[in-house]
Image (tube, rainbow, N blue to C red):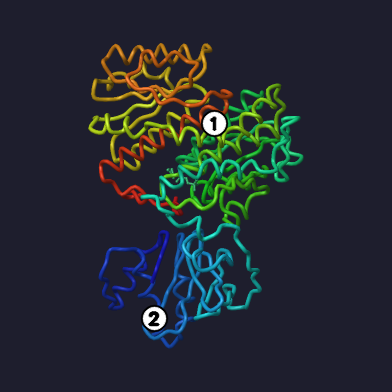
Amino acid sequence: MVHNGIIENYDELKAELQADGHEFTSDTDTEVVPHLIEDAMAAGHDFEAAFRAAVSRLEGSYALAAVTADAEAILATRRDSPLVVGVGDDAAYLASDVPAFLEFTDRVVYLEDGEFARLESGSWTVTDDEGLLLEKSVSRVEWDAEETAKSGYDHYMLKEIHEQPRSLRQCLRDRVDELTGSVDVEALEGLSPKSVQFVACGTSYHAACYGAHALREAGVPSQAFLASEYATAPAPVSEETLVVGITQSGETADTLAALRQAERRGVETLAMTNVVGSTAARECDRTLFIRAGPEIGVAATKTFSSQVVACNLLSAAIAERSDAREVVGALRDLPGQVQELLDESHAEAVADRFLDSDGYFFIGREYHHPVALEGALKMKEITYKHAEGFPAGELKHGPLALVTEETPVFAVVTGDGETAQKTIGNVKEVEARDAPVVAVTDGVSEVGRYAEEVLEIPETHPRVAPMLANVQLQLVAYYVAKKLGRSIDKPRNLAKSVTVE
Ligand code: F6R
């Protein structure tokens, strides 16, 4: 039995099964399923009927696959948890995500909730919950196997950081008109909401913060919500609200719950996702694919920068801006600038210097605020060290108490406008407390004067600079984790797709 998800009524089922003499050998919720199957087989059902009978007793979310020692088939089903069938020439595959079998086939059948798959060597069938045969279409995914190999890099995360020039180009391809600064994305045609609410989790939430800021700046009321909060405490909507779910995997349970919440209230929904065929892509009214290619490392890297580019496309489609042409020009130059940064970054030396620090702080204002949040998240999830990101102005409202000479502060500052000057004021505050400052900055800002280390980024439009700054912070987190010997691609306690609420 393989199970992804949570069987919510397992206590009850376990008590019932134990009362009937079943002996459990683990504390997992999963174990009730094979006992239920055993029970039904003992009552005379064949394996498939027993599997269906067992599944009919379950409450919760699950992708399940079952096999017996002498069975010729693998049986599988799903509810609120992803499950896909890979169709090979002489084999069939089962996984919760396509990259798992991409090495063997690029043909995929997406299972819906309540459908049952039966896999035998070289053949597969899908039936509904009553056993009726369904005609499922086979989709071909555009990703290729090479994209899912490490290609000489020590870790997928490093490979994916280095793939950003390419993934950003893919995200933009055929979607922007450099002459007019307009965007041409089918999914966004005719979109004219009066307000936008973003729902997302983790890294995707940071992209959502960026997107909401971009729309607000263009005069469209817009907010980013953590999906897990929005699912139970949604914000008021009107008929002209658009709810955008940003989700790399398209399978994050919290984000799906928030989007379903929006759908129930009758508002238009848009999924911004990386995975064609994912649940979010299938359930939302519109879909904007970020085209980052498969991301294997648990820590999101290239998908974040593509999400931020996609937020620019979305914002341009919804609201007219006087600087549209400059932004499009800067986006066009972005992949090349990321490459330049990757070639020249000395993030590894910075990582070396601050390896033993007690903790790390990340500050930035406005468009750099999401980068500060993301820099801290990357650092904590792969190094297991304490890291906090916040808007620079918040520093003196509490976190400053934690700032010491053992806590480097990464300050993201670009340009020389009022916002940059204010952040520099905050940098001086931490410097006065002897905290080492690492400035992530362009050649314009004078923040470097107050910093012990400078991670430079090429000069660009203020809306594009955060993506470059973020690449420097990805590299710092990566090298700190590497030097500490962490499990970078699979950090402890984390999963690539979080399919339970
Ligand atoms: C962090 C990370 C997570 C995900 C979050 C949402 O590196 O990967 O925080 O961003 O679990 O996942 P998606 O975007 O698939 O909805």
Give the percent coordinates (x, y) of residue 201.
Answer: 47, 42
How many numbered marks does the figure carry? 2
Give the percent coordinates (x, y) of residue 60.
Answer: 45, 60
Q: Is residue 429 left or right of residue 296?
A: left
Residue 161 position by quadrant: top left
Which residue is pictured at 37% across the width and 25% down the height?
A: 410
Of pointers 1 and 2, the one earlier in the residue sequence: 2
**Residue receiving disc 1:** 210
**Residue receiving disc 2:** 68
Which residue is pictured at 36% across the width and 50% down the height?
A: 154
Depth check, front residue: 119 or 499: 119
Instruction: Verify CB contact (< 8 Å) between mark 1 and mark 2.
Output: no
Could you say whether the residue bearing mark 2 is in a helix, strand or loop? loop
Depth check, front residue: 263 or 206: 206
In this view, 416 is above or below 208: above
Q: Residues within 10 Å of mark 2 (few under 14, many from 20)?
A: few
In this view, 126 is above or below 243: below
Q: In this view, does 39 lie to the left or right of 167?
A: left
